[in-house]
Amino acid sequence: MQLIDPNHPAYRRLWVRIAIVAVCFSWATVEIIGGDPFWAVISASAGAYAYYMLFWTFNPQPTAEPDADDDEEPAEPAAEKPSKDGQVD
C-alpha cells in the first residue's frame, strides 16, 4: 500500500516536499512538548514515511506534456538536391 505517490505533480517542487516533512516533524515536537507521546510517535512516523517517499526514494517519472499540435505530424525538412555540377544548393 502506497500512501504517497511520488509521481503526483504536486510533489515536483522541492519546497512542497520540504514543507510536508517539516510540518510532520514540527507537529511531533509540539506533541512531545505538550506531553502526549502517542501522537508524537504518530506524527514522527508520518514524517519519517514522508521523508522516505519524498526524498530517499524520490525518482519521479517524466511526464509528457501535451502540445497544441499533437494531431499533426512534424514537418520534415526538404531534402537538398545536388545541382548539375554536384554541389548542394
Image (cartoon, rainbow, N blue to C red):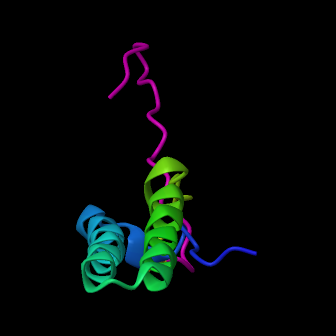
- Check if residue 81 falls in the magenta segment: yes
Q: Is residue 29 left or right of residue 57?
A: left
Q: Quadrant of the C terminus?
A: top left
Q: Quadrant of the N terminus?
A: bottom right
Q: Is residue 17 visible?
A: yes
In the rendered view, tell whether residue 18 sits above or below residue 28.
above
Q: Residue at x 43, y 13 (%)?
A: 86
Q: Residue at x 37, y 16 (%)?
A: 87
Q: Where is residue 57? Give x, y as percent.
A: 55, 50
Question: Which segment is the magenta one?
Answer: 70-89
Residue situated in front as seen by the camera: 33 or 21: 33
Q: Where is residue 41? Give x, y as percent.
A: 49, 74
Q: Give the prevailing secondary structure in the magenta stretch.
A: loop
Toward the front, the furthest residue is 35
- Check if residue 5 falls in the magenta segment: no
Residue situated in front as seen by the camera: 35 or 74: 35
Q: Residue at x 48, y 62 (%)?
A: 48
Q: Residue at x 53, y 52 (%)?
A: 59
Q: Where is residue 46? Give x, y as percent.
A: 49, 74
